[in-house]
Image: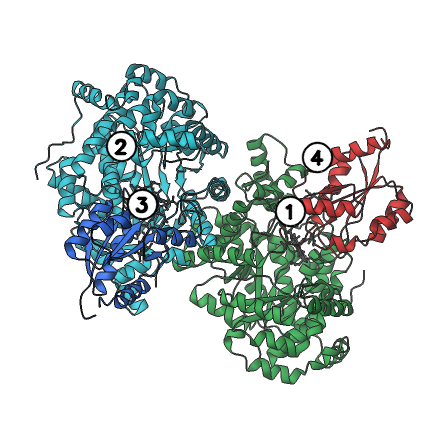
Chain colours: A cyan, B green, C blue, D red
Amino acid sequence: MQTTVRQKRIDEDEFLEMRKAVLAEWPTGKEVDLEEAVEYQRNLPASKNFTKVTEKLRQEGKTNIFPRAGTPVLEEEIKLVKTLVAAGIRHVPVTIDAYTRLHQFEKAQQALEESIKTGRPMLNGYPIINHGVKNTRKVIESVEAAFVPRGAHELAMEIALASGMTSAGKSSLFEFGSYEKKRTLEDCFKRSQYTDRLAGYYTERGAVISTDIHGFIPSGTFPLSVNIAGIIIDSLVAAEQGVRSVIPLLHFNGHMAQDLAWLKVAPRLLREYLDRFGYKDTIIPGVLENQIPLFPVPQNMGGAFAYLNYSAMVAALGEAQAVFVRTIDEGAGVPTQEAHALSYESANWILNVVRTQKIKLEIEGMETEERITEAEVRAILEKVLELGDGDMIVGSIKAVEAGVIDSPFCPNIHVKDKVLGIRDSQGACRYLEFGNLPFPEDIKDFHRQKVAERERAEGRKMDYQVVIEDFWAFSKNKIIGG
Amino acid sequence: MQTTVRQKRIDEDEFLEMRKAVLAEWPTGKEVDLEEAVEYQRNLPASKNFTKVTEKLRQEGKTNIFPRAGTPVLEEEIKLVKTLVAAGIRHVPVTIDAYTRLHQFEKAQQALEESIKTGRPMLNGYPIINHGVKNTRKVIESVEAAFVPRGAHELAMEIALASGMTSAGKSSLFEFGSYEKKRTLEDCFKRSQYTDRLAGYYTERGAVISTDIHGFIPSGTFPLSVNIAGIIIDSLVAAEQGVRSVIPLLHFNGHMAQDLAWLKVAPRLLREYLDRFGYKDTIIPGVLENQIPLFPVPQNMGGAFAYLNYSAMVAALGEAQAVFVRTIDEGAGVPTQEAHALSYESANWILNVVRTQKIKLEIEGMETEERITEAEVRAILEKVLELGDGDMIVGSIKAVEAGVIDSPFCPNIHVKDKVLGIRDSQGACRYLEFGNLPFPEDIKDFHRQKVAERERAEGRKMDYQVVIEDFWAFSKNKIIGG
Amino acid sequence: MTRKPTIITGTVGMDAHVIGTKILSRAFRDAGFNVVELGCLTPTDEFIEAAQETAADAILMSSLYGMAELDLRGFKDKCREAGLDDVLLYIGGILGVSRHDFKDDEVKFKKLGFDRVFPPEADLKSAIEDLRHDLKARGKI
Amino acid sequence: MTRKPTIITGTVGMDAHVIGTKILSRAFRDAGFNVVELGCLTPTDEFIEAAQETAADAILMSSLYGMAELDLRGFKDKCREAGLDDVLLYIGGILGVSRHDFKDDEVKFKKLGFDRVFPPEADLKSAIEDLRHDLKARGKI
Ligand code: B12
Ligand code: B12
């Protein structure tokens, strides 16, 4: 396949041309006046800037909660963000509804109107395009916190940033690998280049817009090296378009030494690669964490609390700036207000109590995890560069085709899905099937040994059946399935 | 004051004489046939022996839950212990009702009969004396677990051990310092010597009966050195009477480095003192932990889960053999069955997930906490020995009179109550007022410095008001008050 | 089984959750079924076409994002119109929006024409047994 | 305050919980009250004797172990018989047995003759204000 997209900054004139088409997609596009918006952004207080809020949390040694929330009706959305901020939250994500994400603005409009009429939310998020800049500024002006849209593509991001949101949360590999069935990675990169370029445009004019980056999220038990490589790729793509603040959004998998190692390795390697490609002035103001939600079944309330508290504990010990803990309703459906409140109250207890102690800890084996992960991430990235002849984007597209970037249980038909992860006998995530992941033999042997160890301990073969058992372990108060 | 009790084994003939009076206190005393009971004990499987169950947990690297439970009606008590054991619990405590503890067997009998008639429990525990040996054996024979009575004095312990309970949980300093208003320490030692001698009698005949020892429990924020010194004193008293297995029951105060340091120091010093006084064959099969319950207010459910999960986390990281976590109803009243189930389900998630990882960790500052605590415990014990002219019991009685052993917020009028504890700015417990605790100046200076640091950080004096604020911190999602 | 029955799997509507249907597909394949796997984000019409084309015995549909009820209004009628009267309809996943009683889902989706409805903690081994049982009852195996 | 009012504190019955009543006693002492502190495990008769002996203005009783209702049946009558009609009765702590609504405690203990009932999270500063207010209303300060 011939790819046309390249790791290269979009020319400004071309970009401004592209913008016209984007803004014409829906009437509220007219509300975006870029120069006025830049000015508006430059006058925002530090408390509304995602980068500065993150930096401040780092300086103060605090870990905050990074929730997920968004509701269609404006007044309700304002009430919601006020509740979150009153609960101490400083990074406020605005989850955009599924219709808007899928470019069905007409349908979103109807559902929004129906929501207003019936008083019942008929959309699973905030239809930012239908609301436009004026309304969305009301949301942002209602509280002291930094905003980021979730699931925003071109026009949605235009409106988000013009309204005063200060992070352009978007990740090509995340979109490609978790939300899309048929869309190509090339296409996903194109969309991100636009939003990154937009963030860069603001940044160049003195309004720092960060981008928080998920990478290819692990589905099930899967070591984080593919994810971290993806975070670095997406960050380099963003930096090339002028983004000067990137925030990795990592994923816990539940094994403390690994999770803490990953928290250290990811920003270190990210810094190295940013420097290597000349993005020395792109900063990493902090790291955000995500509780892996796989998969407490709804019935088990004690387990749901334990899981989220454990995640908060690891985030606090890892000194992350914020953590997305799943509510106790995670396995049951969309969380109620009460479930949000209870869950964050619980996690906040842990975050406050642990961070106040300024704990510095060493876990036996953490260095090994760091070393292994680092070697894996480097192997992937170097192979990507090789495939792309030095171009990260071209290389990534080829890498996915070749299975050099791969992930199990993926919705996208373009992903090889030839890899599998499994727990070892102490609960660490190991590769069971490497597919075409380009790891050195000694690294593969390390994984094989760990898997063999568990085979001996349990007296059975580690195979797909066990992978599935591992999936459900946390629902059964365990870290290892079986 | 002239004390008559001494650290000296009760002569066997004298002991057998004493037993007659004890057994005559209530008709069920007749059910105790000591030789038959020893034989019965010797035939119990390892799964019913408290010492062996504890040792096994240590070998397997597991942390279990050590609940609190006891209900008056026999059939209900059997149902209760079955539920606990089905939930994975292997150490089953039988909490004895308050009337029995206070020697009001007649009243307990009435309330028991009323409970049976009305179907509603009219006692806050299991009236072991009224039930006697035959009934209590039914409880113990209904499950595979090791039993220990809680709150058993002489006759109650006779019945507990003859029924097949395998730990004589009893601590003079605990009783004296937490449950009694006017009873003297001398009196408390006398009672323990009896029950310890009884445990020793079984042990000498091949049925190992352990004793789990609380020591003087800290009320509120208070460093654990007085508690640990007390555990050692009570253990030496037990060992002298022939107990060959002692299990420290430590208390968390919420600061990880301290809690983990205490978990290491206590058994180490206990071993040293046991050896020094010639009790080399008295083993320490493991350590049990208690979540300090101070003081989540009932309304805060998220916090209650967080607190117990955090306690489970620290117990697991400290590799304790079992932990008593308070239920989510702790601040609200006697926990419902549902609250028990949910709370242990939650804690078990943490215990299983963490212990499987076989985590070995080092926290910065832990060594300092170990060193300080060790110096304090030694200072107390050496002073006690000095006061007692080498006799731990005589010394302890004098030490309490002199405030060399002291604790704040104590119910007992014989305790000086001249000491206070407070949190430092990282949440560790420090002495604010030393009273007559016999610590070296450099140790006192260490505490003073830490307190001064917090004074500077908060720009206010650390005094009694702040001590009270610290009390409530955990109820407000914090480790430090204010 | 004397004959290898054919089943259609997939996640319906605009729902991108794919993990469950992937696991389910493999489990049925390993149990000897012929599985046509449509993956996530699959419109109802695609289920019907696939069932027609392969003369399927059953459709095993998943939905997690809480909008299954909307997605599936009129689906049973469409099946009838397409001559799929005889195709067994199973559904599983997270079928309601907020924390709720699974019994409600069961009633709701049975009304919508599904033969069996499964909760998130459904055991696939017994689901396989269920399908075998139902196919036997209909004389299909 | 023009006059130093006298109050009796303590934990009633066979209840050994002492921390709350110790803190309470000190808070009232620091606020200028004359506090007669009986500590824990205090029978109702001792409260009455102490109130008589010191001509107390109020009894501030604590109970945590869940048996206060039993301990206090007939207590108000005994107070009356002892000529303590005019002594204010306050109670606080954990007054019921299992998790329950504090409102129930309030009703119950007011019926038993208490003038004010406090939940576990009671703020002592406002309790002090309450007592001052009530004493003023009765012309005691
Ligand atoms: C992983 C996940 C994601 C991943 C999905 C990756 C992917 N492409 O698959 C990502 C991050 C992309 C995602 C996105 C979204 N998600 Co999501 N997600 C989850 C999560 C955490 C796990 C789902 C899962 O994979 N479970 C594991 C699999 C193996 O289980 P399963 O699918 O239930 O299937 C098993 C059984 O149910 C059964 N089964 C399933 N189907 C059938 C059918 C039959 C016939 C039978 C017999 C059995 C059966 O067998 C399977 C194997 O045992 C759940 C919460 C949770 N903990 O369950 C939320 C959850 C499903 N997501 C939710 C939501 C709202 C979304 C979003 C709309 C918004 C958002 N928050 O981002 C988007 C949806 C985008 C879209 N267009 O669909 C909600 C749905 C709410 C509801 N139902 O009311 C949930 C419940 C989270 C929550 N509490 O809010 N999500
Ligand atoms: C510490 C404690 C103990 C210690 C007590 C040490 C001591 N001697 O004081 C020990 C370990 C000995 C103990 C023993 C028992 N305990 Co206890 N204990 C507690 C615990 C954890 C804290 C109590 C406390 O000190 N709180 C802090 C103080 C400062 O708060 P407070 O007393 O409520 O007082 C404040 C306010 O209420 C208010 N206030 C109090 N009184 C008044 C009065 C007035 C007029 C006003 C204005 C305000 C006011 O002001 C105070 C200061 O702010 C509670 C559970 C909890 N988390 O609350 C259980 C608890 C009280 N104990 C309980 C029980 C059952 C017992 C035992 C019977 C059995 C057992 N489990 O061992 C024995 C009792 C023995 C006996 N004879 O009494 C139950 C009571 C159940 C119920 N009410 O239904 C509780 C609730 C635990 C539980 N959930 O099961 N306990």
Q: Secondary structure at mark 4?
A: helix
Looking at the picture, does residue A261 appear above or below residue B99? above
The verdict on a common chain for dots 4 and 3 is no
The verdict on a common chain for dots 1 and 3 is no
Which class describes the residues within 10 Å of circle 3: few (<14), some (14-19), or many (20+)?
Answer: few
Q: Chain of mark 3?
A: C
Residue mark closest to the camera, 1 vs 3: 3
- Which residue does the numbered mark 2 point to in the structure image? A104
- Which residue does the numbered mark 3 point to in the structure image? C73
Mark 2 residue type: Gln
Q: Secondary structure at mark 2?
A: loop
Question: What's the mark number on residue D101?
Answer: 1
Marks 4/2 in contact by CB < 8 Å: the verdict is: no
Q: Distance of mark 4 from mark 2, alpha carbons?
A: 58 Å
Q: Distance of mark 2 from mark 1, alpha carbons?
A: 49 Å
Residue mark closest to the camera, 1 vs 4: 1
Q: In the image, residue A334 lies at what x, y percent?
A: 40, 43
Q: Residue at x 50, y 50 (%)?
A: B310
Looking at the picture, does residue C123 appear above or below residue A159? below
Marks 2/3 in contact by CB < 8 Å: the verdict is: no
Question: What's the mark number on residue D125?
Answer: 4
Judging depth in this view, the residue of B205 and A387 nearest the camera is A387
Q: Is residue D94 left or right of residue A69?
A: right
Q: Residue at x 61, y 77 (%)?
A: B137
- Label 4 CB-ligand 2 distance < 8 A: no
Residue mark closest to the camera, 2 vs 1: 2
Residue mark closest to the camera, 4 vs 2: 2
Q: Distance of mark 1 from mark 4, alpha carbons?
A: 23 Å
